[in-house]
Amino acid sequence: MKTIIPRNTIDKMATVMLWASAASAMLLLSYIIGYILLNGMWVVNLSFLLESPRLSGAEGGIFPAIVGTLALVAVAIITAVPVGIGAAIYLTSYAPDNALTRTINFGVECLAGIPSVVIGLFGYAFLVIYLGFGFSILAGGLSLMFMILPWTVRTSEEAIKTVPMELSEGSLALGATKWQTIRRVVIPSAIPGITTGVILGIGKAIGETAVIMYTAGSSLLLPHSIFDPVRTLPYHLYILASEGISGKMAYGTAVVLLGMVLAINLLAVAIQRRYESKEVK
Amino acid sequence: MNQRTSERIIEVSLFLAALLAIVIVLLILLFLIKEGAPVLIKFGLRDFVLGMNWNPIAIVGEPSYGIFPMVVGSIYIAIGALILSIPFGVASAVFLIEIAPGWAQSVIRRGIELLVGIPSVVLGFVGLVLLVPLIRHTFGGCGFSILAGSIILAIMALPHIITISADAIANVPTSTREASLALGATRWQTIRHVILPSARSGIVAAVILGMGNSIGETMAVLMVTGNTPILPEPIYNVLDPVRTMTSNIVIEMNYAAPGDHQQALFATGIVLFLMVAILNAISHTIIRSKRVSTR
């Protein structure tokens, strides 16, 4: 005998299932973050943050890895931001609709799709060996730049596109040149969006590992110039965990790394919020 | 310098900035080919991609470079990740657009942003300390396995699948939805028979993109899959360890001597690059054709 379930019951069951799937996704996320924080929180203190590691990282702190991470990200951001914003201005305000423009857009898409380990290989062959930078902050930072450039271009483009046409038309009608309009009208209105994009880009760059493994090296010494090798936090975490050097130190490093990324995420959200609330007024 | 020349100079420098992305892509291709092609020519593309035996430092006999087990490993783990993340992801996307009240929407959106932000090495670490022991105790084996890799990759793919599917679902016109409800269909009937079919191509694009991302992922997979360069035995045994193409590159770059061995790693990079590029191209084509057709 075939039993027929009333469709309203099915509808209710389906609704419960959909609630459950979304709720379990959120629970899983909180579990992952909570697990790391609870296990690693007690490792993190001032001396962990400010001391150099001893015995390959089994004891001591992670100061050089923090410095290394910040140095690499700084190089990547300083190079990617002007180029990325420039490219975005060109693509939104100057580019004619022709084959070359489509090729440029295709190139940006391509670059965004290249697996990070392949960019790492390229960084090794081109920057470390061919240009002779060696394992260094410079080589690692530029490799990271290749990684975040497409992101910078796309988010800046989005931000510029949201600037109302009337604003730039008004400026042009007043006799301003195209560049004056872009510099004094378009860019200032797009700055909050661009800033959010750049900050999220920093968050991405901090966590990247495969790109910098064979470009920045793995030195645990403090760097003195951009030609010195460094180890970053994610690489340090990988080595600590996979070589079984110290579980305790690995948890601590993971907390610091996660904390940095989450803080940056919150900062981006805060900027976006503040901008949106201004918009409403 | 008059105004017109300076305007021109600015336009040209902006153009050069935009051109840089292509220059980088071309340089990447050039250097991959320059470093990887010699070994492909020496051993033959077919034997390289379909060869079963990866033994770069042979103690007895000739070294051999066959990456087939790793090609299979990469695809295997990516498909496993999709099987786990698609039902979850699409259900969450449907929930987000069709059912969730305002507060739940903002919780989910914030959660997705957080999940995207977690560095892959941290997820790999969580996999290493939580998932691998769990699998070892529950199912036996060493724990480092295809299953572990697929679960971690599924978690990484989830936010992307939710976001793109949610966009596709949100793009289904409200009139379509209302017509179905007006005919007396329940909300679930509308979702299943009207909304999901109309959003299908967007969801397919999300899935293919997720596949490409999963194949290209390195650190998280590297830390939980055990990395043995042989096929699982028997082939459907998801508890066996496996090595992906990305792991192969990262592990062996450490000690590969310049020459055939290092070149074979660049050649692995070429194969990886091509697979990911093809998947991305398919996915972008679907997304773009959908965008045009809805106009």
Image (cartoon, rainbow, N blue to C red):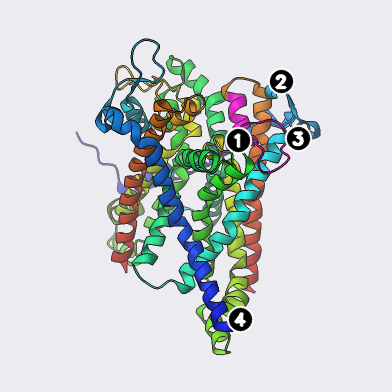
Residue B229 horizontal/vertical position (percent): 38, 21
Which region is colored magenta? A217-241
Q: Residue B1 — which label? A: 4
Nearer the observer, disc 2 or disc 1? Answer: 2
Residue A226 belongs to magenta span: yes
Q: Position of residue A271 (x, y in %)?
A: 65, 60
Q: Quadrant of residue B97?
A: bottom left
Q: Nearer the viewer, residue A203 or B194?
A: A203
Q: Amino acid at mark 3?
A: Leu
From the image, tell me which residue sits under label 1.
A234
Q: Amino acid at mark 2?
A: Leu
For marks 3 and 1 on the same chain, the one whose residue lies earlier in the sequence:
3
Q: Amino acid at mark 1?
A: Pro
Question: Height in image: A124 above or below B196?
Answer: above
Residue placed under numbered mark 3 in the picture: A49
Element marked by disc 4: loop
Question: Is the Cβ of the residue at disc 4 closer than 8 Å to that at disc 3?
Answer: no
- Crowd rating for badge 3 (residues with CA inside 10 Å; few <14, some 14–19, many 20+): many
How far separated are the C-alphas under marks 4 and 1?
A: 49 Å
* x and y percentages locating residue A176 in the rendered image: 58, 85
Magenta: main secondary structure equals loop
Task: Say yes or no: labels 3 and 1 on the same chain.
Answer: yes
